Amino acid sequence: MAHPQLMLSNQLCFRFYALERELMAAYRPLLDELGLTYAQYITLMYLWEHEKGTVGELCSALSLDTGTMSPLLKRLEAANLIERHRLATDERTVEVSLTHKGRELELKALTIPSHIASCLLSSEQDEQSRKYAELRRMLDETLSQLKQTRKERDEAGRK
Amino acid sequence: MAHPQLMLSNQLCFRFYALERELMAAYRPLLDELGLTYAQYITLMYLWEHEKGTVGELCSALSLDTGTMSPLLKRLEAANLIERHRLATDERTVEVSLTHKGRELELKALTIPSHIASCLLSSEQDEQSRKYAELRRMLDETLSQLKQTRKERDEAGRK
DNA sequence: TTCTGTTATATTGTTCACAATCTAATAGTG
DNA sequence: CACTATTAGATTGTGAACAATATAACAGAA
């Protein structure tokens, strides 16, 4: 028999992993309409809030490294949503800013959070509990809620 | 000014996203020693528990699609950790089973969960609260705890 | 100023992750 | 039995994600 600490069902971490992908799956159809991926979406979110920022600031704010950010920005630039310019004061630094089109996209994104919230909110909730047991329950609940919502919307969209 | 529902700091989902990657970063050095990725690790975890399974069962248990699983299994097979055989009773179905080497690897993996747990457990914890506020606090706490642990171990490993 | 080290970003190579498509095998229907 | 639909996996193509490396610009010390 398997060692209990190595059983999938006992893995808190697997719950995070599965939940994260399920969440991305919830975003995908919404972001598809804007032609964005989630990583691109949060990159723009930073820029909508701060108007502009260096590559390093973006990497740090989103906890991504340059190997992820550089090509991502290249694609956003190719989509004409951002511009990149090296600073005159320090030619190593690249400053990223929104184009008009990139700024406009914020308006189309405004409804996304409430759509996602509707996938995350379950209809019932109850008592409190011990820290990790509660967190684990929350994650399970959230994950199954997400899956349920996706299934429903999938079936609704099919007919 | 930015719309509040589109600010990164207000995004529950961004917390999941950041936390998941931070968690993977915690696993990476441990799994590197076994020559595994996280996806490969949980695939083996399924097999350690069930001894064998079809590609479809693995996809379903791990919530991954065949486009991810097929090449992943091919790499595990190349590493001589698993074998793949089509079933005689249904030639469409591929059954995956552990090799001796794959079975042995479980012993080396036994200590991983407690290592990860030590990254996840913070030294203090307090009161309860409303559902999402509490979950959000938990995620923040877990994320910063993970980051702190990684920083410490990074610095410790550097000297 | 020149040399050295550091910093900011970009590139390369591997693996995930998933949509879309493909192939082969099975099941179901007339 | 023949035809069609379904199912199980594999493949292709795109975009993350990250380690490792490369490149160029800046900073500090001799």
Image (cartoon, coloured by chain):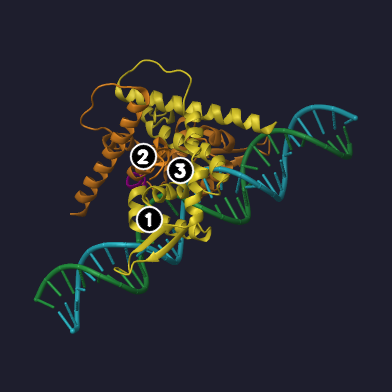
Chain colours: A orange, B yellow, C green, D cyan
**Which sits earlier in the primary sequence, circle 2 or circle 3?**
2
As drawn, the label of residue A40 is 3
- Taking the image as shown, residue A62 lies to the left or right of residue D9, namely right
For the point 45% across and 27% down, the residue is: B142
Q: Position of residue A15 (x, y in %)?
A: 37, 38
Front: mark 3 or 1: 1
Residue tagged by mark 1?
B52
Q: Is residue B23 visible?
A: yes
Image marks 2 and 1: residues in contact by CB distance under 8 Å: no
The alpha-carbon separation of the residues under discs 2 and 1 comes to: 25 Å
Residue A106 position (above or below residue B61): above
As drawn, the label of residue A39 is none
Mark 2 neighbour density, 10 Å: few (under 14) some (14–19) many (20 or more): many
Residue stretch rendered in magenta on the structure: A28-32
Q: Amino acid at mark 1?
A: Lys
Residue B98 position (above or below residue C1): below
Pointer 3 and pointer 1 on the same chain: no
The alpha-carbon separation of the residues under discs 3 and 1 comes to: 39 Å
Q: In the rendered structure, the residue with mark 3 lies on which chain? A: A
Q: Amino acid at mark 2?
A: Leu
Q: Dividing the image into 4 quarters, which one contains the C terminus of chain B? A: top right
Q: In the rendered structure, the residue with mark 1 lies on which chain? A: B
Res. A93 image quadrant: top right
Residue tagged by mark 2?
A19
Q: Dot 1 lies on which element?
A: strand
